[in-house]
Image (spheres, grey):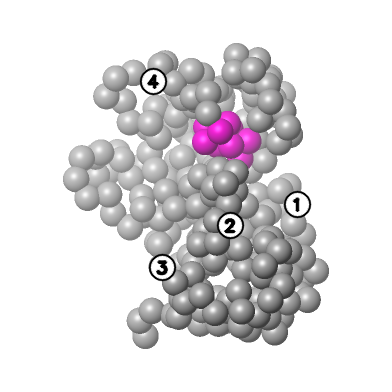
Amino acid sequence: MLNTIRSLPYLALLEWLNQECTTRGLVSGGGRPLRFVPQEDLPAGAAYESWIADTGCVPTRDNLHDRYNAMVWQCCPETKARLNHLQAAQLLLHGSVGVRGKVRDAATLWDENLMVLACNDRAEELVMLLAAADWPGLFLRNRDRWHRDWHPVVFGHALLEKFEHPYKSITAHCVVLESVSPQWALIDPQLARRVTTELGPRALHPLPVMGIPGWREENASASFYQDAAVFRPRRGP
């Protein structure tokens, strides 16, 4: 799918996406049949998330950011629809002007910058290491568990775009799912159930992703993790 998303000419991409949406019965957060449309179809003054929920139309520009957004809709439609529903409900409740609030902030972090850590079994140790920002424990002492027991899967479309020109300090916001294989069909329903009005930024674990073994050649050396500007200690109590 990645090659299709990246390489198809813009109008052909929209046609392909919409055929997929129809075949699979994908819907927006408002339950409307999903379609990908040119950005200029979004009416002036309309709130992006509300318009998607109400019409099913996803405004899409011809750039990698929006192409990756469309790809995640295809890979994880239940979670994307839940996030859209949550954002639209918050806009209806609070309006689009003024303070966004923690729920909308968290939903945006999910949408743009989320990484799922899918664990084969129990996840207590991984969660503990993330919460403590114990980077040596996470990336060095447990190096052999990455890609065997702990599987990083990128959800956020802005995060995907950052990997076009990777740099050491790329940081994802993580959700840990336990007892699940790293397949979207299995991840999507579990992830969608996490999208509630209790969503908040503090429930997400920051993770400097270039520390993941195999994701950068230099991280084979322990000295890579001594950069405190990237691998920061835990803040607060």
Inspect the image, locate mark 2, and give the three-letter code of the amino acid beneath it: Met
User: Which quadrant is home to the C terminus?
Assistant: bottom left
The region drawn magenta spans: 64-72
Q: Which of the 4 quarters of the picture holds residue 42? A: top left
Q: Which residue is mark 2?
A: 115
Q: What residue lies at 64% left-to-right and 17% top-to-bottom?
A: 9
Q: Which residue is mark 4?
A: 42
* Distance in Å between CA atoms under marks 3 and 2: 15 Å
Q: Who comes first in sequence, dot 4 or dot 1?
A: 4
- Indicate left or right for 161 with 125 as reference: left
Contact between labelled residues 1 and 3, with CB atoms less than 8 Å apart: no
Q: Is residue 194 visible?
A: no
Residue 25 x %, y %: 66, 28
* Distance in Å between CA atoms under marks 4 and 1: 33 Å
* Distance in Å between CA atoms under marks 4 and 2: 29 Å
Q: What residue lies at 22% left-to-right and 50% top-to-bottom?
A: 99
Inspect the image, locate mark 3, and give the three-letter code of the amino acid beneath it: Arg
Q: Which residue is mark 3?
A: 202
Residue 219 x %, y %: 67, 70
Inspect the image, locate mark 4, and give the three-letter code of the amino acid beneath it: Leu
- Indicate left or right for 206 with 103 as reference: right
Q: Regarding mark 2 in the picture, which secondary structure is present there?
A: strand
Residue 72 x %, y %: 61, 40
* Distance in Å between CA atoms under marks 3 and 1: 26 Å
Q: Which residue is mark 1?
A: 183
Q: Who comes first in sequence, dot 4 or dot 2?
A: 4
User: Which quadrant is home to the N terminus?
Assistant: top right
Circle number at residue 55: none
Contact between labelled residues 4 and 3, with CB atoms less than 8 Å apart: no
Whether residue 140 is situated above or below residue 192 in the rendered picture = below
Contact between labelled residues 1 and 4, with CB atoms less than 8 Å apart: no
Q: Which mark's residue is nearer the viewer, 3 or 2? A: 2
